[in-house]
Amino acid sequence: KQEVTQIPAALSVPEGENLVLNCSFTDSAIYNLQWFRQDPGKGLTSLLLIQSSQREQTSGRLNASLDKSSGRSTLYIAASQPGDSATYLCLCDMRFGAGTRLTVKP
Amino acid sequence: DTAVSQTPKYLVTQMGNDKSIKCEQNLGHDTMYWYKQDSKKFLKIMFSYNNKELIINETVPNRFSPKSPDKAHLNLHINSLELGDSAVYFCASSQDLVGAEFFGPGTRLTVL
């Protein structure tokens, strides 16, 4: 059964900094990997989806990469803003990581 | 034109009651899911249906019974509610088992 881990559990950075969130999974035979953000008390907003055959996806200041052989995905956020503050979740074949709670300080 | 909708948004009920949460998607997807987000905010898959057939049941108690009358709907019925059932329940859908998942807004269930 797929197990998904996210590191770090929490991250606090000053505005403008570039940052990387990590997601690791145990079974490399994945269908896809999807990154979400969740604001407190809110639902899930899909950010990026990487299919099994892809290596990365980009949307605006966000870039997600996938390395199946090492069982890892990273979410890169460039020039972070206070509005990026949220919990970021990694979903791999119906299995969620515990999330990384990001705080971007003005 | 909401893609994945859930009703109700909030549900407060007493222990021992039976309740249902409804989910509908208008995306024409074949696969639907129920996830539970507990008090520690951890999201866990409960059920997955593909073309109205149950394909995943993650050791969920028998008190939880999903029902899929058609591909666009996946309802969750819970019998004999317990305090530990208090959580936010999210419905989701995807084109198939490998497609991107689209989530509903969630239903916050509180059992008193």
Image (tube, helix red, strand yellow):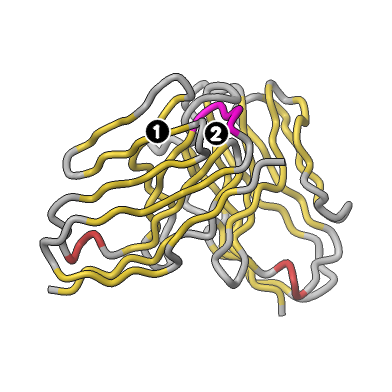
Determine crowd level at label 1: few under 14, some 14-19, many 20+ residues with C-alpha closer than 10 A.
Answer: many
Residue A70 lies, with reference to residue B60, above or below; the image says above
- Residue type of the residue flagged with mark 2: Ser
- The residues bearing labels 2 and 1 have C-alpha atoms spaced at a distance of 14 Å
Is residue A31 within the magenta segment? yes
Q: Residue at x 69, y 21 (%)?
A: B51
Residue at mark 2: B93
Subunit bearing disc 2: B
Among all residues in the image, which is located at the extreme front? Answer: A70
- Residue type of the residue flagged with mark 1: Leu
Residue B67 lies, with reference to residue B7, above or below; the image says above
Is residue B44 within the magenta segment? no
Secondary-structure class at tag 2: strand
Determine crowd level at label 2: few under 14, some 14-19, many 20+ residues with C-alpha closer than 10 A.
Answer: many
- Quarter of the figure with the C terminus of chain B: bottom right
Residue at mark 1: A49
Give the percent coordinates (x, y) of residue A87: 39, 61
Give the percent coordinates (x, y) of residue B58: 77, 46
Q: Residue at x 62, y 66 (%)?
A: B38
Residues B105 and B33: in front is B33
Subunit bearing disc 1: A
Identify the magenta region: A28-32
